[in-house]
Amino acid sequence: MSTVVELRNVHKSFGSNQVLKGVSFTIPKGHVTAIIGRSGSGKSTALRCIDRLEVVDSGEIHVCGHQVHDPAVDLRKLRVDVGIVFQSYNLFPHLTVEQNITLAPCAVKKASRSDAIALAQRTLKQVGLADKAQSYPEQLSGGQQQRVAIARSLAMEPKVMLFDEVTSALDPQLTSEVLKVIESLAAEGMTMVLVTHEMEFASRVADTIIFMHEGRVWETGDGGMLRNPQTQELKDFLSHGL
Ligand code: ADP
Ligand code: MG
């Protein structure tokens, strides 16, 4: 099975705060990996290092053939292959949904306008918003805006999608709309890494769950791991929550 993302012994500090203390994991093609753990355990930092939004202090990160730890890495090419979606959607309020989605394919991939619009139509269909192309963000619910943000990422045709707590700002109804989209992407074989607090969702959809604790990968397993935690730290996390 081919590997899409590999972290090898990654260290990262902010000042004297050691946030990643030798993190290693492998994300195979077509797999869904959920990263869970307490607030401050380094989940977002690990995710951001994959897309080089943070630069590692030491260790190696390999993503779709890019040596992300190498200062000479081609960031433009890396970011075509890696899509990342955050809790905040960051859509441009003065642009329609379609314009928000076509912006990057036109600017970065030099797609023609008609190809970019076709991509927007296809990706909006994937997230269940085919009828919203001409809407403005403020006319949409938070869940719909987040689905547009996912469509915008998909329009770059990434090889791997990273999701950082994309449902944390949403109420349960809107959360379930977004999770349904993520689940359908999983069914289509998209390689994904999700930082999430949705434990039931992680158990059901993830092929692999990574529990991070104090900057380390503490426990790794399949969806069943949460029903049978091996370490006291994971037991505590599951019983006390965030
Ligand atoms: P998590 O996503 O698991 O909640 P983070 O990776 O966001 O954890 O943060 C881990 C630690 O790193 C926290 O102590 C946080 O304050 C610190 N941190 C994260 N990003 C930065 C940054 N850009 N500058 C300084 N400290 C940061
Ligand atoms: Mg975080």
Image: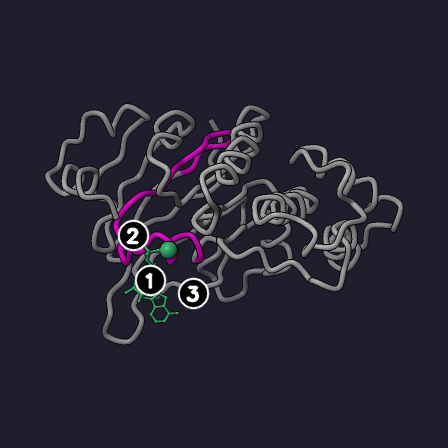
x%, y% of residue 26? 38, 39
- Foreground label between 1 and 3: 3
Which residue bears the numbered disc 1?
A: 58
Q: Secondary structure at mark 1?
A: strand
Give the magenta-colored segment's residue range: 27-48
- Alpha carbons under labels 2 and 1: distance apart: 8 Å
Q: Residue 69 in the image: x percent, y percent?
A: 44, 59
Q: Is residue 74 magenta?
A: no
Residue 195 seen in this snapshot:
yes
Of residue 123 and residue 3, the one placed in the foreground of this image is: 123
In the rendered structure, the answer to whether residue 78 lies left or right of residue 238 reads right
**Quadrant hosting residue 159:** top right
Q: Secondary structure at mark 2?
A: strand
* Ligand 2: quadrant of the figure: bottom left
Task: Tell me how far mark 3 sits from mark 2, CA to CA.
Answer: 14 Å
- The first of marks 2 and 1 along the sequence is 2
Residue at 50% across, 53% down: 86
Q: Which residue is mark 3?
A: 55
Q: Amino acid at mark 2?
A: Asn
Distance from label 1 to label 3 (Cα)? 9 Å
Residue 109 visible in the current orientation: no
**Above or below — where is 155 with respect to 33?**
below
Q: Toward which corner of the image does residue 42 lie, by quadrant?
A: bottom left
**Ligand 1 neighbours mark 1 (CB distance < 8 Å):** no
Which colour assignment does the render follow? one colour
Q: Residues within 10 Å of mark 1 (few under 14, many from 20)?
A: some
Identify residue for label 2. Answer: 9
Residue 119: percent from left, percent from top: 77, 41
Above or below: residue 203 compared with residue 70 = above
Residue at x-position 43% and y-position 42%: 194
